[in-house]
């Protein structure tokens, strides 16, 4: 039953992240980072005050979450040569959230949420991308298309931020679970003082 509940929680978290990615914007990314910071503050309080072995969970959660968050920070200076995971992950799935259909040849326009820049992608008969670029809404290349009718797409940097925070929390939960299990097994083997 515990594993079914854990799987259900994981599936629900994927649905929530999928919806957040669909509506990715700078404002939403700010709130996701803010909530991540609040979760870390609550975890610090619980690491201090929770009885053992729950205390172990929160310490493991904090160490792994903050470590993952730091390792994926684009502005880190220490260990800067390590690759980040949210950027390639965002590149991998971002196109699935765009209002384009590579199977149909043609030119597709979209504007990232919260921006006025118009992006375009062009596909050939084989579904291969021929071109990609950006232009201002007043550019003559738009050929008189009303900018208000162009579909809105998720904002790419916000997309990466949401992925980074999600994986930091997900791996933090895994790290917390591992330290909780080891703390519980250690508690079971300690002789009682009587």
Image: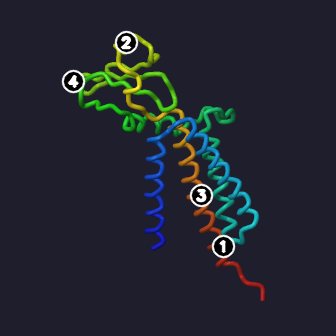
Q: Earlier in the sequence, mark 3 or mark 2?
A: 2
State how far apart marks 4 and 1 are (Cα): 63 Å
Give the label on residue 175, or none.
3
Residue at 67% x, 55% y: name it.
62
State how far apart marks 3 and 2 are (Cα): 51 Å
Q: Residue furthest right?
A: 194
Location of residue 12 in the rendering, given as x and y in whole percent from the top left corner: 45, 58
Label 1 or label 2, whichever lies nearer to me, is 2
Label 2 or label 4, whichever lies nearer to me, is 2
Q: Is residue 135 above or below residue 91?
A: above
Q: Rate crowding at label 4 as few (under 14), some (14 to 19) or many (20 or more) other CA atoms within 10 Å.
A: few
Q: Which residue is mark 2?
A: 141
Label 4 or label 3, whichever lies nearer to me, is 4
Location of residue 40 in the rendering, given as x and y in whole percent from the top left corner: 67, 53
State how far apart marks 1 and 2 are (Cα): 68 Å
Q: Which residue is mark 1?
A: 186
State how far apart marks 2 and 4 are (Cα): 22 Å
Instruction: From the viewer's side, name the closer residue of 152 and 95.
Output: 152
Q: Earlier in the sequence, mark 3 or mark 1?
A: 3
- The answer to whether 11 appears left or right of 128 in the picture is right
Give the label on residue 125, or none.
4
């Amino acid at each position: 039953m515990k594993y079914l509940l854990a799987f259900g929680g994981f599936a629900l978290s994927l649905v929530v992240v999928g919806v957040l990615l669909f509506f990715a914007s700078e404002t939403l990314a700010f709130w996701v980072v803010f909530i991540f910071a609040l979760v870390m503050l609550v975890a610090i309080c619980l690491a201090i005050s929770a009885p053992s072995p729950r205390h172990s969970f929160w310490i493991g959660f904090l160490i792994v979450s903050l470590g993952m968050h730091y390792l994926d920070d684009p502005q880190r200076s220490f260990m800067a040569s390590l690759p980040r995971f949210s950027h390639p992950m965002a590149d991998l799935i971002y196109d699935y959230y765009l209002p384009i259909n590579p199977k149909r040849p043609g030119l597709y326009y979209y504007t990232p949420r919260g921006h006025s820049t118009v992006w375009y992608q062009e596909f050939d008969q084989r579904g291969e991308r021929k071109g990609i670029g950006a232009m201002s809404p007043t550019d003559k290349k738009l050929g008189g298309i009303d900018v208000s009718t162009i579909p809105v797409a998720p904002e790419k940097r916000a997309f990466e931020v949401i992925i980074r925070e999600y994986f930091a929390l997900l791996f933090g939960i895994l790290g917390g679970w591992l330290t909780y299990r080891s703390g519980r097994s250690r508690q079971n083997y300690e002789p009682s003082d009587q």
